[in-house]
Image (cartoon, rainbow, N blue to C red):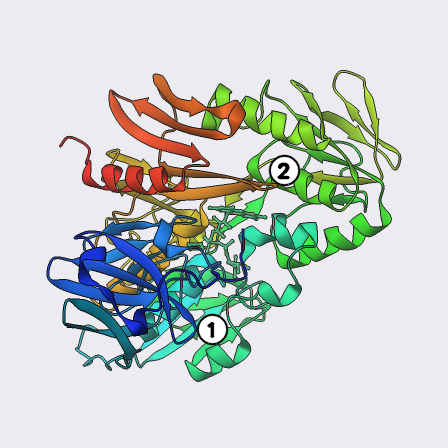
Amino acid sequence: MTAEGAQLSGPDFMQGIEAARLAEGAMLLGYANGEAVLLARRGSDIFAIGAVCTHYNGPLAEGLLVDETVRCPWHHACFSLRTGEALRAPALNPVACWKVEQSGGKIFVREKARRPAAEARAASAATPCAIVIVGGGAAGNAAAEMLRREGFDGSITMLSADDAAPYDRPNLSKDFLAGKAPEDWIPLRSPDFYRKKEINVRLDAHATSLDAKGHAVVMSDGSHVSFDALLLATGARVVRLDVPGSDLRHVHYLRTLDDSTALIAAAERARRVVVIGASFIGLETAGALLERGLEVHVVGPQARPLERVLGPELGDMVKAIHEDHGVVFHLGTSASAIDREAVTLKSGERIAADLVVAGIGVRPETGLAEQAGLAIDNGVLVDAYLKSSAPGIYAAGDIARWLDPHTGKRIRVEHWVVAERQGQTAARNMLGRREPFDAVPFFWSQHYDLQINYVGHAESWERIEIDGEPSRRDCTVTYFEGGRKAAVATVGRDFESLRAEVELERSRAGA
Ligand SMILES: Cc1cc2nc3c(=O)[nH]c(=O)nc-3n(C[C@H](O)[C@H](O)[C@H](O)COP(=O)(O)OP(=O)(O)OC[C@H]3O[C@@H](n4cnc5c(N)ncnc54)[C@H](O)[C@@H]3O)c2cc1C
Ligand code: FES
């Protein structure tokens, strides 16, 4: 979801506003010098920061104040009111910060405050000199950036098997695939950014093995890359179809930018697509291809899409949204064969298709960790600080399985924001911070103009409570597991999602 930036509205803060208009714990949207500004009061302090989130331009004035921070309603980024710093992904850039003055019962916003430069960290014997990151995705990129933000001045090498520098992967099944986002939105950073930050990004660089004791990564060309500390952030790979015809050229998958551009090129020549898999990615892909004018059929084994994650009510809601737009579902079945003209289902039905996309799940890319003998159990096992079982080696993102203090269970999730936040925490811990990873998981999914926000983690539940009306696309769905609130999904209630996040943050297993 994107916006061109908030329209200027509200008072001109440079002209001053009556102090009484800004109550304790309240926010006010206005502007200063042609820029949208958010004014917030915390006790005797009044803060003025940029009002537009640096992720996708979300409206911070509709977000939630928590202590001296504000959280974005769209994808839960968090900014410091005091410094404008992006404290939590998915925002990677700060917002501006303005000086504020009070006089004669009025509040005035003055000029922008200067941002303090990152202080170089004093190196200690324990600080690594060379940090290597395997993976140029969400976690890898966020980690590399955080190392520099924390003042690390040693060498950073990011090895990525991808031939594109880190990009906005969630967009590949959304606006980009639908043709509503130009390609220049997709890179997370420009090549210049990495050059200036002295982050050595090596693309098309395949790590084939890891010498955990010798502290070296072995590359496909036989070369060795030595490290003092290593972050494994290798993400996940798609599960491939295993039916006759699945190797035909019109059968596509969606994980990388190359996959998405190949799919767009194929969609331009196609009339009818069968999406195999009624998963989040399968359904987002279905919606995006429909927006490109294709006839879309979705095949899935379950009775309702997304029921296992979201429950029957939201499953029905998502199905209805897609049907309203013209998607045809074939549920309770799966593909048994593909040929050049059609997909044949187990039921015997044939669906004509000149394009097929499979979205049948992913597996964590744990090969390097396994081969190096790191502890593995449905992912790379990490401690509270995201450290693996091998000294100096951390893991983050889709591959990491950590002990979630909120559920008391080891979990592994495949969410963009979690991967970025883990990359950031791992980076600080590689520099000796000892910061536990205790963020409540968050993900979003977008279907046309509807967004589902989900906080927490419930692999199963004994009870679902629904407030509102899913069919009206306005509801809060709460999942209870083991007698406690484990997760909350919202539709059309972004503010509720933020409040639920805070509530879940304050709850700990056994507390
Ligand atoms: C199309 C799509 C849409 C999505 N939409 C959403 C969404 O809406 N919301 C949400 O929360 N999540 C979404 N996700 C999931 C989200 O993108 C992932 O959870 C996230 O990218 C995981 O980050 P990561 O850093 O662990 O792995 P990735 O981002 O996958 O990065 C892994 C990196 O490791 C590299 N790599 C792997 N093996 C090697 C090797 N041996 N040597 C060198 N490099 C290697 C890869 O090339 C890649 O650069 C989506 C995913 C996809 C594919
Ligand atoms: S727009 Fe603010 S977090 Fe995405």
Please indicate whether residue 96 sits to the left or right of residue 447 in the image.
Answer: left
* Mark 1 touches mark 2? (CB < 8 Å): no
Residue 75 in the image: state x and y as whole percent. 42, 49
Seen in the image, is 490 located left or right of residue 410? Answer: right
Report x, y in % for residue 220.
Answer: 57, 66
Q: CA distance from mark 1 to mark 2?
A: 38 Å
Residue 417 tag number: none
Q: Earlier in the sequence, mark 1 or mark 2?
A: 1
> What amino acid is found at the position of numbered circle 1 in the picture?
His
Relative height, residue 293 to residue 336 (above, below): below
Relative to residue 71, is residue 119 drawn left or right?
left
Query: Mark 2 belongs to which amino acid?
Result: Gly
Secondary element under disc 1, as helix, strand or loop, is: strand
Residue 103 pos. (x, y %): 15, 73
Q: Which residue is mark 2?
A: 282
Q: Is residue 128 above or below residue 234?
A: below
- Of 207 and 183, the residue lying toward us: 183
Vertical side of 237 occupied by 212: above or below = below
In depth, the one of 253 and 169 nearer the eye is 169
Residue name at image x 31 percent, y 81 percent: 153
Q: Residue furthest right?
A: 341
Quarter of the picture holding the C terminus: top left
The one of 206 and 11 positioned closer to us in this rendering: 11
Specify the label residue 224 is tagged with. 1
Q: Determine the secondary structure under disc 2.
A: helix
Left or right placement of residue 502 versus residue 209 in this view:
left
The location of residue 334, given as percent across then percent down, is 69, 24
State whether residue 228 appears in this view: no
Mark 1 or 2: in front is 2
Q: Residue at x 27, y 55 (%)?
A: 27
